[in-house]
């Protein structure tokens, strides 16, 4: 489990029992938020720097992903910096506690005297930090502190995270391209490509018995609106097992496949059920070699614990957008216990298993990492997803399926349309804007909000 450093400061002339009491309460609040802490307090500005040196020694015995600098009272800047300079490479939270009331009297240990003396210093030293201050009479802001720490944990996880991508640049799209060097430098994420030939070679070695086990125990448990072709289900199971074996061997957390010009054209098989099975296993998945879409999914998955599925745009309305999928949705986006699927064909493609599940409604955060002129920006958009009107995509066999979709109400459709970066955006439920901002501030990625 990831750990967070916690060091509590208070000036040498402040009663030590008060500093300990306040730091202990702050420590307990962070543990209640689910953080595993490496704690040291109280740390004062004693002339011999005994407590400062002891804090540096104790913190140095453990590994952690972020440092919470908890200011429980006035503290001279030098005493704090002599600890924090050892961790300038880590994200930090500068957290000022607050005073209390005794009857009609306000009692303070000058916590914000300490934080206001430190904030500009931290900024000048180039620290990556968030400043949080408590207010008397209100709930402590431990949740904000923990939220930033979780973003720091995500940033650390991304340094070794990998996307597995079969093929590259499906349909010769431009919006799904990426620059590998700058992406690694900015986020730490690596996109590894593997050939579709390898999928086929592994598929050819999978036995009918192995395929049948997946069909009987996984696929047939989906809600089929009409019977599916057995050959289609066996192909889905076989290709799924081939892709999953590659993902497990190479420790991929996200998967994208060459879709239209790959699986459909070369293998004669629409890959939606492959993605559906992988999604049930906890992988984040996006089609069409959508590089930065897959990277965005990894970030959102780590931040929120959701599978961060994708939706693409079909229509713009005055105050909303129609966002749906022509293939599959992530397992945790489904409004129900299992996928609802339909054997169907589109245009000249062979029959596939189409996911037509109803999508959960509610507040959603749409996000996408973008790259332009050498600079990365995270677009963030808050919306309200509601059940869409009856609609269809032209080209499906009649009666055409009602594709999985949401009508998403947003504050400024025109502004969004003027800045939209791709047909795919990543969906998480709830208002996740602040934790995304935290991650971007740690990674040095600009945020564009609509």
Image: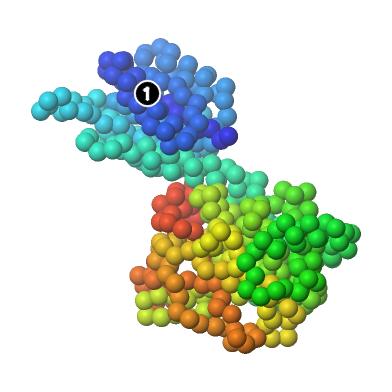
- Image quarter in which the C terminus is found: bottom left
Pinpoint residue 250: horizontal percent, then vertical percent.
75, 50
Pinpoint residue 99: horizontal percent, then vertical percent.
23, 29
- Residue 124 versus residue 6: which sits nearer the camera? 6
Is 419 placed above or below 126 here?
A: below
Q: Residue at x 51, y 66 (%)?
A: 359
- Image quarter in which the N terminus is found: top right
Pinpoint residue 58: horizontal percent, then vertical percent.
52, 20
Q: Residue at x 47, y 36 (%)?
A: 34
- Residue 180 versus residue 212: which sits nearer the camera? 212
The type of colouring in the image is: rainbow
Pinpoint residue 17: horizontal percent, then vertical percent.
30, 15
Tell me the quarter of the picture where residue 356 sits: bottom right
Is 43 placed above or below 444 here?
A: above
Residue under pointer 1:
24
Determine crowd level at label 1: few under 14, some 14-19, many 20+ residues with C-alpha closer than 10 A.
Answer: some
Residue 278 shows in the view: yes
């Amino acid at each position: 489990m990831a750990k967070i450093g916690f060091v509590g400061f208070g000036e040498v002339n402040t009663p030590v029992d008060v500093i300990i009491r306040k730091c202990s309460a702050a420590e307990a609040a962070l543990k209640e938020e689910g953080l595993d802490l490496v704690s040291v307090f109280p740390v004062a500005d004693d002339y011999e720097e005994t407590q400062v040196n002891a804090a540096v020694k104790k913190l140095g015995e453990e590994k952690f992903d972020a440092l919470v600098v908890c200011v429980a009272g006035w503290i001279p800047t030098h005493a704090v910096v002599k600890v924090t300079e050892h961790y300038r490479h880590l994200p930090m939270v500068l957290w000022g506690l607050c005073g209390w009331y005794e009857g009609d009297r306000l009692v303070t240990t000058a916590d914000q005297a300490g934080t206001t003396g430190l904030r500009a210093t931290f900024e000048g030293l180039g620290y990556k930090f968030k400043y949080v201050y408590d207010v008397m009479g209100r709930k402590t802001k431990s949740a904000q502190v923990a939220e930033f720490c979780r973003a720091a944990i995500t940033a650390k996880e991304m340094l070794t995270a990998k996307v597995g991508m079969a093929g590259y640049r499906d349909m010769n799209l431009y919006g799904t391209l990426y620059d590998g060097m700058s992406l690694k430098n900015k986020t730490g994420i690596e996109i590894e490509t593997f050939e579709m030939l390898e999928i086929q070679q592994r598929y050819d070695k999978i036995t009918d018995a192995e395929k049948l086990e997946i069909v009987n125990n996984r696929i047939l448990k989906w809600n089929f609106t009409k019977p599916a072709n057995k050959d289609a289900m066996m192909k889905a199971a076989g290709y799924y097992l081939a892709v999953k074996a590659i993902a497990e061997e190479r420790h991929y957390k996200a998967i994208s496949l060459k879709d239209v010009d790959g699986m459909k054209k070369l293998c004669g098989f629409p890959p939606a059920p492959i993605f559906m099975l992988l999604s049930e296993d906890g992988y984040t998945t996006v089609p069409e070699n959508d590089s930065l879409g897959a990277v965005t999914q990894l970030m959102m998955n780590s931040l929120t614990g959701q599978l961060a599925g994708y939706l693409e745009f079909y229509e713009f309305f005055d105050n909303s957008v129609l966002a749906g999928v022509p293939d599959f949705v992530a397992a945790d986006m489904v409004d129900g216990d299992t996928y609802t699927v339909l054997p169907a064909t589109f245009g000249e493609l062979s029959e596939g298993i189409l996911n037509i599940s109803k999508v959960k409604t509610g507040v959603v955060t749409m996000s996408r990492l973008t790259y332009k002129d050498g600079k990365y920006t995270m677009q963030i958009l808050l919306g309200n997803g509601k059940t869409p009107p009856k609609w269809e995509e032209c080209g499906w066999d009649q009666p055409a399926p009602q594709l999985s979709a949401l009508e998403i109400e947003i504050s400024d459709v025109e502004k969004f349309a003027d800045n939209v970066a791709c047909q795919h955006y990543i969906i998480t439920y709830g208002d996740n804007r602040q934790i995304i901002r935290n991650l971007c501030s740690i990674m040095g990625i600009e945020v564009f909000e609509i």
